[in-house]
Amino acid sequence: MSAPDPEKIFAQLLSTTQHLPQGFSVAESQQMTDLMLQSWSAMVQRSLENPAEWLQTVSGFYQDQFRLWLNMFSPSPETDVTPEPGDRRFSAPEWETSPLHNYLKQSYLLSSRWLKERVAESGLDEATQKKSDFYTRQFIDALSPTNYPLTNPEVLKETLESKGQNLLQGLENLLQDIEKDRISMTDESAFELGKNLAATPGSVVFQNELFQLIQFRPLTETVSDHPVLIVPPCINKYYVLDLSEDNSYVRYCLEQGNNVFIISWRNPDESLGDKTWDDYLTEGTIPAIKAVKSITGAKKIHGVAWCIGGTMLATTMAVLAAKRNKPFASATFFTTLLDFSDPGELGVFIDADQVKQQEEKLAEGGVLPGKQLATTFAMLRANDLIWNYVVNNYLKGKTPPPFDILYWNSDSTNMTAAMYTWYLRRMYLENKLVEPGGVELCGVPVDLGRIDCPVYFLSAIEDHIAPWKTTYIATDHLKGPIDFVLAASGHIAGVLNPAHKNKRHFWVNGETGQGADHWLATAETVPGSWWPHWDRWLKSHAGKQIPAPVQLGNQDYPEIEAAPGSFVLAREK
């Protein structure tokens, strides 16, 4: 077998890495380019109004770059340009020990800083400036010298040591990912649903075309007479809450003496494209509540929900309350938006023009592909969720290590066209949910003020999908007693913090009524996992202990198949 030709391999990898954003998401890449060009054109126009200031700014940039060049072989700490805190791209020692690569790193960081400063000082309106900042950062991230084989010293070292085998393996990894139409974030061969993920014993006790209801087998001799119904997001698979055994929130709930049910949403195909938010209540959450009460004989249940599942639970509770039906003893919301006035960086993708485009695109029904949503979320943290894997998988030729959360993250789910477009317009764009009667569902006006049971509201301080300061606004709209808790980390890791690992910390007991910043300034910091804190809270609102059921389901809701059920196994192609 002839030796690999490094020159040809480099050329192939350079070509593919330069076009990765287009390959994985054409729509987002074209929009990124168009919006960045528009915003930078506006900034240049403004700069021409004061050419002397612009000339001084550009001149200063080139002087700084020239100073870096002069200092390449004798860098001075006073002139070093260092990565921002948390930026791990340049952590390898080669970025310091190699004068050329140290210069490339600092030149790139200097250019990045200069571009960001130009956006910050652009004088554009707030919405346009946010878009410009976001897409400029996407452009900056894509051009990092870490992302290309000829400018990454770690890749060059690996290539020399393996005689180019890393590039051959990387090319094979790339071709496999192009066939899958997604970037591999974990070793997917290490996981199997029902074996080492979503493996908590239980049975499907009800199903229709939208969901399966799973009842888990109790792990204690007695359980609370208030069962727990978990409503996960319909844009993800439920097993984010039932990952590996030591990382399963479902298992923790069972170990604390709860009778636990969970909704497993179907991954909708085009035949379900006309299913609306109304349908997800009338054919989803409401039948699930009815089944749980019938199976357990409970008068009251505990609701637990995450992200858009929390929004669905809140609208369900408000609809039932309008019909004089209040089946919940308590409600727990994880990283849930009810007020959408500031959706954070997701707002870059949501304005009147973009929502109208989505409505026109999906006017004939069908589904929004889960991969498109996954790409959007990945762009919010492109260095961690895109370029990190480009370098590891395609340039270094490595297989990412097994990680249950990232396996789940890659198992994307579609959204029905009717639900998605309504959700975008009525909630994100118009923020109608917080207006009493602002939306009508199931034939009644929705008023969140009708939710008056005890509520545990968990948010995450680094959440880039449901910004915690926006989630906090919900405390002004719900009428029951509210315990607001803020977890360290982000949208996923902030929630998944098993008690036995006891990592990170959380905040509680801040002063309410004076905004999110005041709440945090007056809150108490508690080390470790928030799970035991929630468990104590839930028990304070629980009923009596009763013998755990021996059989799952009942005559009206018999066991259909073993958990995790067939719906969760359907993977997007």
Image (cartoon, grey):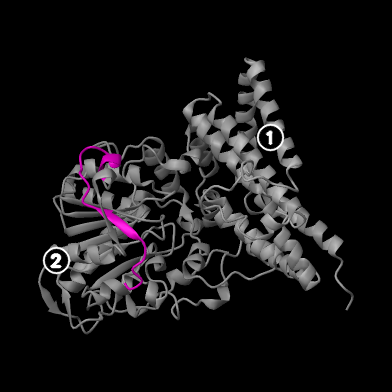
Image coordinates of residue 410 in percent, x first then y, are 53, 63
528 w.r.t. 325: above or below: below
Judging depth in this view, the residue of 354 and 28 nearest the camera is 28
What's the residue at 24%, 63% (across, down)? 534
Residue 299 left/right relative to 283:
left
Image coordinates of residue 48 in percent, x first then y, are 66, 17
Image coordinates of residue 532 in percent, x first then y, are 25, 67
Q: Main secondary structure of the magenta part?
A: loop
Under mark 1, the amino acid is Asp
Judging depth in this view, the residue of 168 and 339 nearest the camera is 168
Tell how many labels. Answer: 2
Dot 2 or dot 1: first in sequence order is 1
Q: Which residue extends farthest left?
A: 544
Which residue position holds label 2? 542
Under mark 2, the amino acid is Ala
Region in magenta: 500-519
